Amino acid sequence: MTNLSPAFKESLEPLLLAIADDELIMGHRHSEWTGWAPHIEEDIAFSSIAQDEIGHANLFYTLLSGVIDKSPDEIALARQSSEYRHAIICERPNRDWAYTLARHFLYDTAERIRLESLRASAYKPLADVADKLLREERYHELHAEAWFSRLSSGPMEGRHELTVALSEALSDAIGLFEIIDSEQVALEYSILPESNEDLLQKFLSDASERIESYGLPFQLSPSESEGEFLATSSGEMIEGSDEQAAAPPAIAEAEGKWQVTGEFAGMGGRRGKHSPEFDELWDDLTKTYREEPTATW
Amino acid sequence: MVTRTSISRQEVYDVLSGVADPEIPAISVVDLGIIEDVEIEENRVKVTCLPTFVGCPALDAIREDIENALEGVGAEPEVEFVYQPPWTSDRITAKGKRKLEEYGLAPPTGRSPAGPTRLTLLAPAKCPYCGSRETVLESPFGPTQCRAISYCRSCRNPFEQFKVV
């Protein structure tokens, strides 16, 4: 990796870190269903998906370790909670089955959109990995789709729960496409073949089309995602108008399509702004490492 | 341990054919199709492998098993995992598929140049116990990342199948 120019490296780092952290934190939340899922097949499914995602995180941390000269474990576990760059949707507690499935659907849709794009990355190791991961990720999406199909054709209660959960998860899902540090440089080098803004638009078209195909009585309520109070990693709430944590753009339906309206200022996950729930997750995730950083397994 | 100055390609493949997959011991790493390349320079052997699943916890065990086997015949081994080309279930050899079936694990249900699709997922696997095609996929997730769970309507046994990847 020594032949990479400093500017190239500098734009690669935040990109790899954001993707790796998304996978690690999402994988951690999924793993919390181990032993607690509604039935044994789902227990195994979420445990298996968690194992995939954490394995993917490890791979991205390994790519990054070649760029910044730190071990994958060190990158993954030796940071303060405010140094994590995953989107806030990944850290939200599992809450209930409907929210878990709604987020699972949106997250894995977003991940496919991102990986499909990264197959064209000028950074060959990243393009190779994207190609490989897409094959594995397909199973995650098929799993989420099977549940959407089942719940959307089932009794009203399940449809309703899923619809409510989707509306909530969707405003967070936008944060997966928050602009990353040095994004412009990553675009210039074609490390990132498409901007997060373009990927977001693709994500919205893809997700909305599929959600509508299930006939879910889904309605967007754009006002809900505007001017909300946003959480910071320190636990204090700051107003959405604050420069440090501007509100995410709203989503509205126009010409039968979901569109992002307004400026995309991001929700803060990519800038290390997280919810108080992340501090608890971080404590759990990094406890063993912090007690014995030099331990080998 | 024997020390030697050279080793033939055939000998390396013979050794690798004796290295079993740690999670499915019925099949060798060669028949599983994870050996992408072997480079030999005198007694130094570099084996390039493709992981079946990226998060597979058996990768370190596979690396160690290959190294130990090659050291056993006096070679100096080096094992590297790469992601391009991606490993796909199409790489399992015909012999490997037979071994899987004998082991009680249905081989992948189809070929997959572009990875798994809804069609490959819904294609009924052949029951490894009674040979029936009257089977249905119960869950695409099983005891390891590479296995799914199916059910045979003929002999009423649940069974595992290797995923199409």
Image (tube, rainbow, N blue to C red):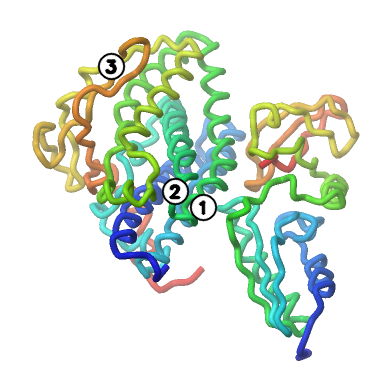
Name which residue lies at 9% across and 36% down. A242
Circles 3 and 2 in contact, beta carbons < 8 Å = no
Circles 2 and 1 on the same subunit? yes
The Cα–Cα distance between marks 2 and 1, rounded to whole angstroms, is 21 Å
Point out the residue furthest to the right here. Answer: B130
Residue A74 occupies which quadrant of the picture?
A: bottom left
| Residue B53 image point, x, y percent | 61, 50
Residue A87 occupies which quadrant of the picture?
A: top left
Quadrant of the image containing the N terminus of chain A: bottom left
Q: Which residue is mark 3?
A: A252
Which amino acid, mark 3?
Answer: Ala
Q: Is residue A192 left or right of residue A44?
A: left
Point out the residue furthest to the front here. Answer: A188
Q: Nearer the viewer, mark 3 or mark 2?
A: 2
The foreground one among A274 and A222 is A222
Which amino acid, mark 1?
Answer: Gly
Chain where mark 2 sits: A
Examine the rendered structure and indicate whether residue B18 appears above or below residue A8. Answer: below
Q: Which residue is mark 1?
A: A55
Q: Which residue is mark 2?
A: A121
Circles 3 and 1 on the same subunit? yes
Chain where mark 1 sits: A
The foreground one among B79 and B147 is B79
User: Of callouts 3 and 1, which one flags the residue occurring earlier in the amino acid sequence?
Assistant: 1
Residue A3's tag is: none
Q: Is residue A218 visible?
A: yes
Name which residue lies at 61% across and 67% down. B80
Examine the rendered structure and indicate whether residue A281 appears above or below residue A203. Answer: below
Which amino acid, mark 2?
Answer: Ser
Badge 2, how many Cα within 10 Å: few under 14, some, many 20+?
Answer: many
